[in-house]
Image: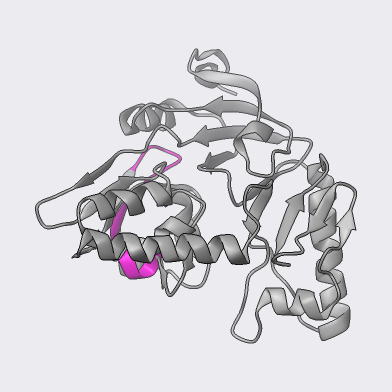
């Protein structure tokens, strides 16, 4: 541990992460850094010489922090949330900007192509890393390029094709943390854009659990099956373990129903994976990112 991390006034120690995740569970982070701007983040990474793992946290919507916490540095991107538009209609959004905020920003500037973001409960940085998508679109279809910084503070621009985006995957190494993205849009009518966004919101509320403690879509689909269908076939809808429960409304969602622990949520997911494999022979893979000490 170098003195910069252990003694810096900008670094908080033993920071409780449960309040930053949608599941509302998890332990503490050994160190926690929340930069106000990209320049401060760049300075921190260049000066930091510790060997501690670093995890970039955005909206906390698709992550599960284990009960024993994270023995490293959490960098919280929530304050890096600027959104701008140029005279060509290209929108630049920082990594901490919420997907829904970017969608509304595009609407307010009469730009279409980003309506689907209103239905994704996350931030731009996480959306790039996961190639998040819904309602017929995904980040691969809207990205021009992204600016990223690595753990040594080196900055690089990655063009869309260099990212190697595929279903819920980005080939850029995890040691690169996304700073912002340039998004392509098209001119549109504000009323039509709003109509599309409203339809997505209504559909999401009808088909997915909302207003509850959840981590979003739990397991990935693949070319051969949809995760929720395999979970349904295996009789796991409504299944419970401790305070965690498979949603009755959409069985690819785990809900923190009764003050569940992270261990109970992860254990329930593993039990579902086992039941699905025994019933169908198909292996489910976590879509939710699980971090921390086992």
**Foreground residue, 198 or 60?**
198
Looking at the image, residue 258 sits to the left or right of residue 143; the answer is: right
Colour pattern of the rendering? one colour
Count of labels in the image:
0
Quadrant of image for the N terminus? top right
User: Which residue range is magenta in the image?
Assistant: 139-154
| Residue 57 vertical placement versus 37 (above, below) | below
Q: Quadrant of residue 160?
A: bottom left
**Is residue 211 rendered magenta in the image?**
no
Residue 151, horizontal then vertical, whole percent: 46, 40
The residue located at (60%, 52%) in the rendering is 62
Magenta region includes residue 144: yes
Closest to the observer, 73 or 221: 221
Residue 163's place in the image compared with 221, above or below, is: above
Q: Residue at x 57, y 34 (%)?
A: 74
Percent coordinates x, y for residue 24 in the rendering: 69, 38
Pick the front one: 82 or 106 = 106
Instruction: Tell me if residue 143 can be seen.
Output: no
Residue 147 as seen in the image, left or right of residue 201? left
Q: What is the x, y in percent for residue 176? A: 44, 49
Q: Quadrant of the C terminus?
A: top right
Q: Kindly tell me whether residue 118 is visible in this rendering.
A: yes
User: Residue drawn 85% across and 55% down?
Assistant: 267
x and y, in percent, of residue 201 in the image: 48, 60
User: Which residue shows up at 78% across the image and 38% down it?
Assistant: 67
């Amino acid at each position: 541990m170098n003195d910069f991390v252990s003694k810096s006034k900008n670094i908080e120690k033993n920071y409780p992460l449960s309040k930053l995740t949608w599941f509302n569970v998890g332990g503490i982070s050994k160190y926690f850094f929340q930069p106000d701007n990209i320049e401060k983040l760049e300075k921190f990474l260049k000066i930091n010489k510790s060997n501690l793992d670093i995890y970039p946290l955005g909206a906390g919507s698709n992550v599960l922090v284990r009960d024993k916490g994270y023995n490293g540095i959490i960098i919280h991107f929530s304050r890096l949330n600027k959104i701008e538009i140029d005279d060509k209609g290209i929108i630049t959004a920082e990594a901490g900007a919420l997907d829904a905020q970017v969608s509304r920003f595009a609407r307010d500037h009469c730009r279409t192509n980003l309506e689907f973001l209103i239905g994704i409960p996350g931030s731009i940085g996480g959306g790039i890393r996961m190639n998040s998508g819904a309602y017929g679109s995904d980040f691969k279809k809207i990205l021009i390029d992204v600016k990223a910084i690595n753990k040594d503070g080196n900055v690089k621009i990655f063009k869309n094709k260099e990212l190697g985006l595929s279903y819920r995957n980005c080939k850029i190494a995890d040691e690169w943390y996304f700073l912002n993205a340039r998004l392509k849009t098209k001119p549109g009518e504000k009323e039509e854009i709003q109509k599309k966004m409203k339809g997505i919101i209504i559909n999401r509320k009808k088909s997915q659990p909302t207003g509850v403690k959840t981590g979003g879509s739990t397991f990935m689909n693949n070319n051969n099956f949809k995760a929720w269908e395999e979970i349904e076939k295996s009789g796991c809808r409504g299944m419970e373990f401790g305070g965690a429960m498979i949603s009755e409304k959409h069985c690819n969602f785990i809900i923190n129903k009764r003050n569940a622990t992270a261990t109970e949520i992860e254990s329930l997911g593993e039990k579902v994976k086992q039941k699905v494999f025994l019933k169908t022979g198909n292996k489910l893979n976590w879509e939710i990112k699980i971090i921390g000490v086992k």
